[in-house]
Every structure is written in structure tokens, then in C-alpha cells.
Amino acid sequence: MQSQPGRLNKDDVDDSGSVTRKRLSTYTSEEDLKEDLVYDKKELWKLQTQEEGSEIRIKYPTEMELSPIRQSINHFGIKPAQNMRHETFLQMLRCLPWTKLY
């Protein structure tokens, strides 16, 4: 669950135009998002998932990392696995399988 996928703050990019190791914040449900943020429902997007047995999988490029934020099971960050240009990271975020929630 993400409000406007592919949006980064200026603080997420260094002087050379590369994305820093900060994360794009995502949540596993709208209920968890409500606890942390004020948002417009029309701006919510969801990553499509695949169920494999008891696991839910999200396909994403190996150049990106998903990691829990503050050991949460509902709040994750998406960040570059290596240094890359801001435009490259934004394009990769936009290519993930997002669907509009509302």
C-alpha cells in the first residue's frame, strides 16, 4: 500500500543525482497506513501479489531491496540495493505492478 508510487523527497537524492539509501515507505494494509499517515484515498496504490502456497510474493527487480521498518510486519521500505541514479530508481518503482486501490 503506497500513496502515489514513485514519489521521492528531495532529501532522498544526493548532489550527484543518485538515490541515497533511504527507503520508500510502504504498508501491508490500509489499516496500518491509517496509524501513521494522513492521506487521500484517491492516491492509494497497491502492489499486485502472487500467492504460492502459504506465502504471498511480490515480484520486484533484484536491484531493489524490501526490508521491514522498525522490525514491523506491516511497514516495509523499498530502496536501491546499490547506488543508482534518481531517475533510474523512479522508473523501476513505476514499473512495479501497481494498481489503483480506489
Image (cartoon, rainbow, N blue to C red):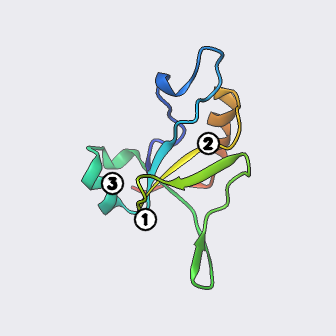
Q: Quadrant of residue 101?
A: bottom left
Q: Amino acid at mark 2?
A: Arg
Q: Position of residue 68 (x, y in %)?
A: 48, 56
- Residue at numbered disc 1: 73
Nearer the camera: disc 3 or disc 1: 1
Identify the residue shown where x is 30% and y is 44%.
Answer: 40
Cβ atoms at labels 2 and 3 below 8 Å apart: no
**Quadrant of the frame with the N terminus:** bottom left
Looking at the picture, how far across and down is residue 8, in whole percent? 50, 32
Callout 1: 10 Å neighbours few (<14), some, many (20+)?
few
Mark 3 vs 1: CB contact within 8 A = no
Residue at the (65%, 24%) spot, across then down: 18
Q: In the picture provided, is 43 more to the left or to the right than 85?
A: left
Residue that label 3 marks: 33
> In the image, residue 27 lies at what x, y percent?
42, 56
Please tell me which of labels 2 and 3 falls first in the chain. 3
Q: Residue at coordinates 64% horizontally, 19% vertically from top-left?
A: 17
Q: Give the distance between the C-alpha atoms of the residues marked 3 and 1, in whole angstroms.
A: 12 Å
Q: Residue at x 57, y 84 (%)?
A: 54
- Please tell me which residue lies in front, 58 or 19: 19
Residue 94: numbered disc = 2
Type of amino acid under label 3: Leu
Label 1: which secondary element: loop
The one of 93 and 64 positioned closer to us in this rendering: 64
Would you call the spot at circle 3 few (<14 residues within 10 Å), some (14-19), or many (20 or more)? Answer: some
94 horizontally vs 11: left or right: right
Residue furthest toward the top? 15
Say if 55 sits above or below 33 in the image: below
| Quadrant of image for the C terminus | bottom left
Q: In x, y percent, where is residue 70?
A: 40, 53
Question: Tag 1: residue type?
Answer: Ile
- In the image: residue 27, left or right of residue 17: left
